[in-house]
Image (cartoon, helix red, strand yellow):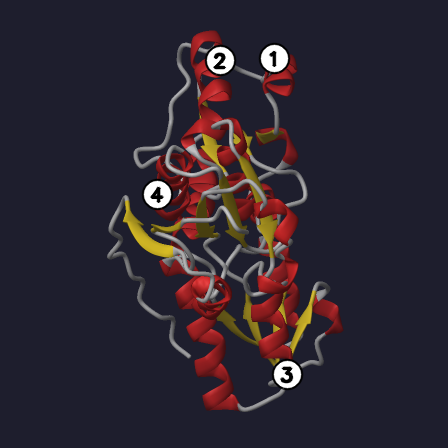
Amino acid sequence: MKKLKKIYLVSPRGFCAGVKRAVEVVNLVLQKHGAPIYVRHQIVHNRHVISDFEKRRVIFVEDINDIPDGSVVIFSAHGSSPNIYQIAKSKKLKIIDAVCPLVSKVHIEAKRYNQQGYFIFYIGHKNHPETIGVLGEVSDKSIVLIETLNEAKKIIPPQTDKLIVLTQTTLSFDDTKEIINYLKKKFLKLIQPPAFDICYATQNRQNAVKALAKKVDLVLVIGSKESSNSNRLKEVVEKSGKHAYLINDKSEIKSSWLENVENLGITAGASAPKYLIDEIIGYFSNKKVIIKELVVVKENTSFFLPII
């Protein structure tokens, strides 16, 4: 690290409004109901957040049937399919929904357009819980999942009069524009929802990291491997022609990465807590380098909490 002179901390980084809301929901439920409480799926995709809650006797489960009848359950920020709610109600679980309002919007759009007779192109990642939740809102005959442009080219919809495209919120405009442009050219009647489904925080962080990549030799992205938006940040940096590493925390930093780096960039995915960012800043604070904030976008979005 002898050549390292300057570190740029790009903003926005770290928790988005949806993640802040979800984490606060778990804290409030613990205060009101006491441990143990159950969460269906990881509340957010960050292993440190999950570990911190597990120490407080929050139990994370994938199968709703594993939760004892009558328990308190929180549904994760990523959204859940209707059949999960039905099982939860049959088990007399007290349901507290921490789904991000932006994800809820896509669920509502899928149901509404399906009822109006539209065939839905859904752009997303196959095994992501957000995708599973949205696909669960409508019949298989009314929606198709698209992950790549090649997949889009092979799709033959059952009709071409009523078509709409919806997207996973944690993708970016860059991730989806190629597929959407193709679909719009092929299907002239294709429409997009009134408010585009890309999460503001996803797009803001990707725009910020593009600006960051122009100023640095290497970028460290703080986030878990399970985090879709964190992985996308790494990819955006690499598409900009710079190296990037996705790390969970300071313990994963390797000095060999920094041998020829003069300017280092740091960002964090939308589910990475502030203390992880602070620890990494502290790791470099005694290295006699200049630490500078690079503010690209200012965020002031917040969401109301559900009734606890």
Which numbered disc flags the more N-terminal residue, 1 or 2? 1
Identify residue for label 4.
Answer: 204
Q: Mark 4 to mark 1: distance in Å? A: 29 Å
Please say if the residues under marks 1 and 3 sit with CB atoms less than 8 Å apart.
no
Q: Neighbour class for label 3 at 10 Å: few (<14), some, many (≥20)?
A: few
Task: Check residue 153 in the rendering and tell me which mark sits there, or answer none.
Answer: 1
Which numbered disc flags the more N-terminal residue, 3 or 2? 3
Secondary structure at numbered mark 1? helix
Q: Mark 1 to mark 3: distance in Å? A: 48 Å
Mark nearest the camera among 4 and 1 is: 4
- Asked whether residue 290 appears in the rendered view, the answer is yes
Please say if the residues under marks 4 and 1 sit with CB atoms less than 8 Å apart.
no
Please say if the residues under marks 1 and 2 sit with CB atoms less than 8 Å apart.
yes
Secondary structure at numbered mark 3? loop
Which numbered disc flags the more N-terminal residue, 4 or 1? 1
Identify residue for label 2.
Answer: 182
Out of 61 and 285, give the one closest to the viewer: 285
Give the percent coordinates (x, y) of residue 81: 59, 53
Please say if the residues under marks 3 and 4 sit with CB atoms less than 8 Å apart.
no
Amino acid type at circle 1 is Lys
Identify residue for label 3.
Answer: 55
Above or below for 108 versus 271: above
Give the percent coordinates (x, y) of residue 277: 46, 63
Mark nearest the camera among 1 and 3 is: 3
Q: Mark 3 to mark 4: distance in Å? A: 32 Å
Secondary structure at numbered mark 2? helix
Task: Describe residue 59's horizontal placement relative to residue 170 as left or right.
Answer: right
